[in-house]
Amino acid sequence: MAEHLTLVSLRRALSARGSVSEKVADDFLSALIASIQDGLQKDGQVTINGLGTFKLQEIPARESINVATGERFTIDGYKKVVFVAGAAHGNSGTKKTEEPIDPIQKLGEQAEEIKDILSELNAMTPETPVEESAEPMPPVVAVAAPKTKKPKRAKKSKEVEQQPEEKTEQAAALVSTEATEKTEPAVAVVSTEAAEKTEASEKTEAPTEDEPAKEKPKPFNPLLTGLITIGVFTMLLIIAYFVLRHQIVSWADGMRSDIELRVNTTPDESVTTAMPEVVEENLNAGQTEGQNSAEQTETNEPAKVTEKARPSSPYFDDSKRKFTKFQATETVGQDSRLAWVAKKHYGEKAMWVFVYEANRDRVKDPNLVRPGTKLRIPKLPLELRDINNPETKALLDRLSEKYLRE
Amino acid sequence: MNNKEIIQSVSQKAALTKQATEQLLHATAQIITETLKDGGDVKIQHFGSLEVRAHQARTVINPRNGQKTRIPAKNVWTFKANNRLKDAVNQ
């Protein structure tokens, strides 16, 4: 063979091998190229037996950077034609001449099998062996002759392949269908018998194909619904658990802050007389609420109480807020600011106001903290620590405005 | 498009019988295969080129279990589409 096979040399070789004129070969090749192109455009895949498969591969658009200018631009996506060699050509260079003979060999083997089975069945078929032993010998004729019948068989075997469990049935079906196809012209007796067999085997095949299709949806439905209901119930339980927990936690926080407040205010000089009453009310409210939640009555009342109790949390009232617990002390360095200290300890710059509040005796101007000043960092209650709480936000805004104006 | 469909399409376009088309297609596949096996390459105008590329043996690691597997050296067929085919496909 030529080192480089071009269209011209291919045409020449083809006309020699196929014993057709070069014109016919040329027509054929151009039609083949056009057909492959059409096929690729139509469904993106063209398979040629004995050669391989041409496929379209989608290459998506991607972004790239112009190295010279640093500019970003997109490279358009496109379709690439890739070729996958047929199974026989997996190691194309090393394997030799397996693939063209392969189908014929298969046919020959199958013919042998059929022969055996048939001879077992009627023990007197003198003509079929002659017919079939002749078949596998001439390669081109053998391929051409059964080809017209091939599709049927191919479909059959595909169908059968889908059910690997029933291999015995599969074999029987294959053999019998082939038997009918091949013996039809030769022996009438054999063909009728074989035809009966195929009918029988097809009957056996048909129900087996239908059964899984019918059975599948049935066992799945109750299982699925059961799973879904279980999932929904667990979700509900989890949600209920968290809601309850949240209520209890918020109630507990309210209690704690109340107690802290009380401790703060009692030694504090003169704050007001109304304050203790408020605290006691809160405490009472908290206790009743606690009892309620302890009894696990899921009525709306405790929820409402907590909702009302939270806004009335004394920490949002400037006059009542007093920090007694401190989590740390911080010595202010050069060029430091309250906001940075707050960011460091609370993760939020806006909370500098609390630091300022807790250190009003040491810091005169919130914008000017002298280096070396020891700042006490107050421990913030939960309701103040939550920056996402709108009330906290409002308080922070209000306080910062107020202190900056001073 | 499978083999059967392409035979039908070609037989219509070239005004050949299906049997003749099939024989010619088979012969074409054989010629191409033989050429490639003999170390040659195939360059078909308006279509593309087929050639054999040697892939060296390499070791791959299964990321699941870290197992090392040796993939032996092999020759693979590569196809490079001609510009015309590329354009036709990317219309």
Image (cartoon, coloured by chain):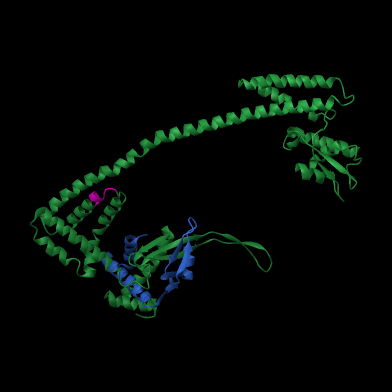
Q: Is residue A134 above or below residue A282?
A: below
Predominant secondary structure, magenta span = helix
Does residue A168 appear in this view?
A: yes
The relative height of residue A168 versus residue A218 in the rendered view (above or below) is below
Q: Residue at x 9, y 54 (%)?
A: A122
Q: Which quadrant of the view contains residue B53? A: bottom left
Q: Quadrant of the C terminus of chain A?
A: top right
Question: Is residue B18 rendered to the left or right of residue A246?
Answer: left
**Coordinates of residue A153 in the picture (x, y in percent):** 25, 56
Residue A204 vertical position relative to residue B22 in the rendered view, above or below? above
The answer, for residue A313, to whether it is visible in the render is no
Relative placement, left or right, of A279 versus A367 is left
Label total for image: 0
Letter of the green chain:
A
Q: Quadrant of residue B21?
A: bottom left
Q: Position of residue B39 (x, y in %)?
A: 39, 77
Front in this rendered view, residue A6 or A260: A260
Residue B9: percent from left, percent from top: 34, 63
| Residue sitting at x 50%, y 57% | B63
**Front-most of A47 and A353?**
A353
Seen in the image, is A130 located left or right of residue A272? Answer: left
- The answer to whether B50 is drawn above or below residue A243 in the figure is below
Q: Quadrant of the N terminus of chain A?
A: bottom left
Magenta residues (range): A165-170
Residue B84 location in percent, x, y? 47, 69
Q: Is residue A140 left or right of residue A226?
A: left
Chain B: colour as depicted: blue
**Magenta-drawn stretch contains A335:** no
